[in-house]
Amino acid sequence: MTRSRARPGGAPAVEGRPFRDRKPQWLKVPAPGGPTYRHLKSMISEQNLHTVCQEANCPNVGECWERGTATFMILGDVCTRRCGFCNVQTGKPSWNDPLEPMRVAASVKRMGLRHAVVTSVDRDDLPDYGAGAFVGVIRSIRTLAPGCKVEVLTPDFRGQEMPLAKVIHEKPDVFNHNVETVPRLYPKARRGSDFMRSARVLRLAKEMGGHDVITKSGLMVGLGESFEEMVEAFGILREHRVQVLTVGQYLRPTEQHLPVIRYWHPDEFAALESAAYELGFESVAAGPLVRSSYHADESAREVAERRRAAA
């Protein structure tokens, strides 16, 4: 039986909105079903690949796939951590496919993607925490689909520098690591992780990659954080040299996950976006349906254009 993620460590249940509560109108999107979406879904299934678009029930999957962007999840679909908001299953991973990097790259080529995002479950069971698999995928995409931009969305590698250095050495176009929520909520939402450790990973990625690598992170709202806490978290990320920021609404996957405390209004997201730009972020996407990979190609392009204009 799956243990409830709504009560981490046996903590008292968090009071929030009922699971089947009616969602605000601004959170409703049409179901995906365009021709490109159907084609890509069939191809991904045939290749036995995993996408976070599907695993996380992303509301933007139809729009992104029609745009020619997709997020691949490597190293299987079983995670070694148990975040209270995440829909990916937790357990003892057994996935080991040395050909996965080439299969992902071949699919990127066949799909004609312009921007591929590569992420993974946490693999704390592996000596390098999965860094080698990211290296393999980046190299393979660069070989088979050299015109495609590569964004990696990695775990924190337990804060270890060598696995991170292996990934940054391959010069991904974007290095993304999500802090997910404000520091105060980590014991509830991200047991086994640490906000400042994640911030340090992002700073090290920028120091190692320099101008060749864009740094990016993302947070959710709806778990009980305040506006002031969000802006404070933004400030910490800017101090750690993060350039791109995404902010979206948390949507509860099942009754076993942490409840939504409240739905933030689109006007509040606009205020968060303004506050982030004032802090110096180069690209910000904030909105109810924004996810980490939402319009990832546009964010990377916006930063590149700013660089050229400043040169």
Image (tube, rainbow, N blue to C red):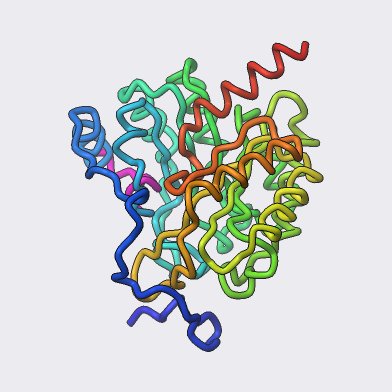
Numbered label tally: 0
Location of residue 249 in the rendering, given as x and y in whole percent from the top left corner: 47, 54
273 left or right of 75 in image:
right
| Quadrant where the C terminus is found in the figure | top right
257 left or right of 231 in image:
left
Which residue is found at the position 63% from the left and 32% from the top? 283
Between residues 243 and 277, which one lies in front from this camera angle? 277
Among the 4 quarters of the image, the one containing residue 198: bottom right
The stretch drawn in magenta includes residue 65: no
The relative height of residue 3 versus residue 76 in the rendered view (above or below) is: below
Among the 4 quarters of the image, the one containing residue 65: top left
Location of residue 213 in the rendering, given as x and y in whole percent from the top left corner: 68, 29
The relative height of residue 269 versus residue 308 in the rendered view (above or below) is: below
Which residue is found at the position 49% from the left and 44% from the top? 287
Between residues 306 and 40, which one lies in front from this camera angle? 306
Which residue is found at the position 54% from the left and 33% from the top? 151
Between residues 281 and 212, which one lies in front from this camera angle? 281
The relative height of residue 68 versus residue 247 in the rendered view (above or below) is: above
* Magenta region, residue range: 47-55
Among the 4 quarters of the image, the one containing residue 233: bottom right
164 left or right of 139 in image:
right
| Quadrant where the N terminus is found in the figure | bottom left
Location of residue 300 in the rendering, given as x and y in whole percent from the top left corner: 58, 26
Location of residue 82 in the rendering, given as x and y in whole percent from the top left corner: 50, 69
